[in-house]
Image (spheres, rainbow, N blue to C red):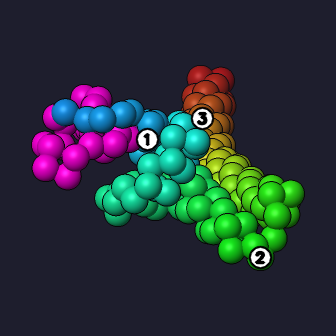
Amino acid sequence: MQRRGRKGYAFYSIVIADARAPRDGRFTEKIGTYNPNTNPATVDLNFERALYWVEVGAQPTDTVRNILKREGVYMMKHLKGGVKKGAFDEAALERKFDAWKNDKQKGLEKIRTEEEKAKKAAVAKELEAEKKINEEIAKKVAEKKAAEAAAKAEQEAAEATAENAEAPAEA
């Protein structure tokens, strides 16, 4: 893998290189890209070339091996081995690989929907918390206004009694 991108935002090219070449140095062929910054990580892979290099004996790094397994390169290599041994034919190979790929896609879709549900639940929870806080604030404001109105009424009542007390004294 060749590191690209800026500081704090890595982006990798998946390359075929001699083991003695430096990480970002000379390479034989670029077969894809890997962006770990997205959720889930984005992989753009030339499947046929990756399969070719794995079949001729290329030894991937641990990260690239995991990427190739997730994309199905090693599954296809395994199935092609079964065809070579005569366990099944090309049509069965395609059916098995398609079934595996569909199962993989369903798993990814399930993960995405669960993440979306979790995000929606978190937003709803935040909204409920904010509503409770707003209700408490509204309650405090209403109590304060009621206290101010009561104080104003008491003051007016005191002024009215004081005026009533002064009026009979004058008479």
Q: CA distance from mark 3 to mark 2?
A: 95 Å
Which sits earlier in the primary sequence, circle 3 or circle 2?
A: 2
Q: Which residue is mark 2?
A: 87
Which of these two is toward me, 83 or 44? 83
Residue type at mark 2 is: Ala
Q: Is residue 85 magenta?
A: no
Q: Which residue is mark 3?
A: 152
Relative image position of residue 1 (x, y in whole percent): 31, 44
Crowd rating for badge 1 (residues with CA inside 10 Å; few <14, some 14–19, many 20+) = many
166 over 88 or under it: above or below: above
Specify the segment rendered in magenta.
1-25
Q: Is residue 14 magenta?
A: yes
Badge 1 element: strand
Which of these two is toward me, 64 or 165? 64
Mark toward the viewer: 3 or 1 = 1
Residue type at mark 1 is: Tyr
Q: Quadrant of residue 17?
A: top left
Relative image position of residue 99 (x, y in whole percent): 82, 61
Crowd rating for badge 3 (residues with CA inside 10 Å; few <14, some 14–19, many 20+) = few
Image quadrant in which the C terminus is located: top right
Which sits earlier in the primary sequence, circle 3 or circle 1?
A: 1
Which of these two is toward me, 125 or 121? 121
141 over 103 or under it: above or below: above
